[in-house]
Image (spheres, rainbow, N blue to C red):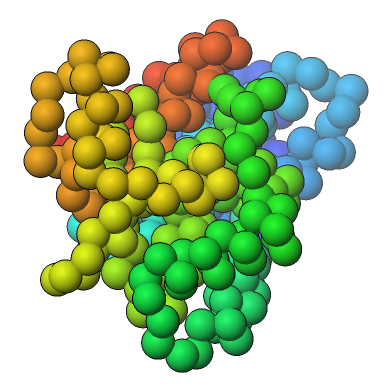
């Protein structure tokens, strides 16, 4: 459709005839996300018509949510190796206009700074010390303990902007940089905590990014699981998949929205969370 035709179709939302309105909304849904800018423009022009604005807001959200779920399912089926893209898609739930390149540029800058310091082969724990210094001293990333359940802690663009996050979001930025440097650092999905592991054929240890990159050993996970009264399972010691990281990020979002009594958002996130499991 041409721009004039789309504008004409959107203007028919003002029609009071319910049959016309139903038909128009169906046509708009069929157009997909290309119609969103026209709906937003129409919303701005009708500030004195709250009921029409509400319909427009609902349509815009419906279309954006459709893009969000389709994007994550497509990622799951075709591009699970790209963790940054997966986290970008998660952030698009709250920030549908977020550009992928804006996140990529920020992560690339941290990587470049780390590359300058890690061009020579050194002991794994020394490499982690250098990364810790860069991550926590230069870039000032830290745990958001004061507002732990804020949804922003699970949204990578917000974590990069504020330098505050939860265990999984901080770990994701750290491991994205580490893996680009060629370091065998991966996520580990512990109960109530997310950490990293450095795992090579000859060396394995763990990194708690939420605690300023504290390095610890397998026996410490043993103690943690006993404290949590959890049975030891090998999955608590070994790298998890990118899909598990995305699902855990969505689970954190659900908890945050539940704390804020945002029940509709909880339902919407649960829908895609379940969809990524099948």
Question: Residue at image x 58%, y 82%?
Answer: 117
Q: Is residue 42 left or right of residue 272?
A: right
Q: Position of residue 233 (x, y in %)?
A: 10, 33
Residue 261 visible in the displayed image: yes
Seen from the viewer's position, the closer of residues 268 and 118 is 118
Question: Residue at image x 21%, y 32%?
Answer: 222
Q: Position of residue 45 (x, y in %)?
A: 86, 38
Residue 76 visible in the displayed image: no
Q: Is residue 255 above or below residue 36?
A: above
Q: Is residue 7 above or below residue 43?
A: below
User: Most extreme residue toward the bottom, as rendered?
Assistant: 120
Q: Is residue 166 left or right of residue 268?
A: right
Q: Position of residue 185 (x, y in %)?
A: 33, 63
Quarter of the picture holding the N terminus: bottom right
Quarter of the picture holding the C terminus: top left
Q: Is residue 16 left or right of residue 170?
A: right
Question: Residue at image x 51%, y 57%?
Answer: 173
User: Most extreme residue toward the top, as rendered?
Assistant: 261
Q: Position of residue 105 (x, y in %)?
A: 63, 73
Seen from the viewer's position, the closer of residues 19 and 275 is 275
């Amino acid at each position: 459709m041409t721009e004039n035709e789309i504008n004409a179709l959107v203007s028919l939302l003002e029609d009071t005839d319910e049959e016309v309105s139903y038909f128009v909304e169906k046509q708009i849904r069929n157009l997909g996300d290309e119609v969103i800018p026209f709906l937003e423009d129409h919303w701005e022009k009708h500030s004195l018509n709250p009921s029409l604005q509400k319909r427009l807001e609902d349509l815009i959200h419906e279309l954006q949510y459709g893009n969000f779920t389709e994007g994550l399912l497509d990622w799951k089926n075709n591009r699970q190796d790209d963790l940054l893209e997966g986290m970008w898609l998660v952030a698009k739930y709250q920030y549908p206009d977020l550009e992928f390149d804006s996140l990529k540029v920020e992560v690339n800058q941290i990587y470049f700074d780390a590359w300058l310091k890690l061009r020579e082969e050194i002991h794994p724990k020394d490499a982690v010390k250098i990364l810790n210094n860069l991550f926590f001293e230069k870039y000032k990333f830290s745990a958001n303990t004061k507002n732990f359940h804020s949804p922003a802690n699970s949204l990578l663009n917000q974590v990069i902007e504020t330098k505050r996050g939860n265990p999984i979001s901080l770990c994701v930025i750290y491991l994205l940089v580490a893996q680009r440097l060629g370091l065998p650092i991966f996520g580990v999905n512990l109960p109530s905590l997310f950490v990293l592991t450095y795992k090579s054929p000859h060396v394995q240890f763990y990194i708690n990014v939420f605690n300023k990159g504290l390095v610890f050993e397998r026996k410490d996970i043993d103690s943690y699981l006993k404290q949590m009264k959890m049975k030891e399972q090998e999955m608590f010691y070994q790298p998890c998949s990118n899909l598990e990281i995305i699902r855990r990020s969505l689970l954190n979002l659900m908890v945050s929205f539940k704390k804020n009594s945002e029940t509709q958002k909880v339902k919407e996130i649960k829908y895609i969370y379940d969809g990524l499991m099948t």
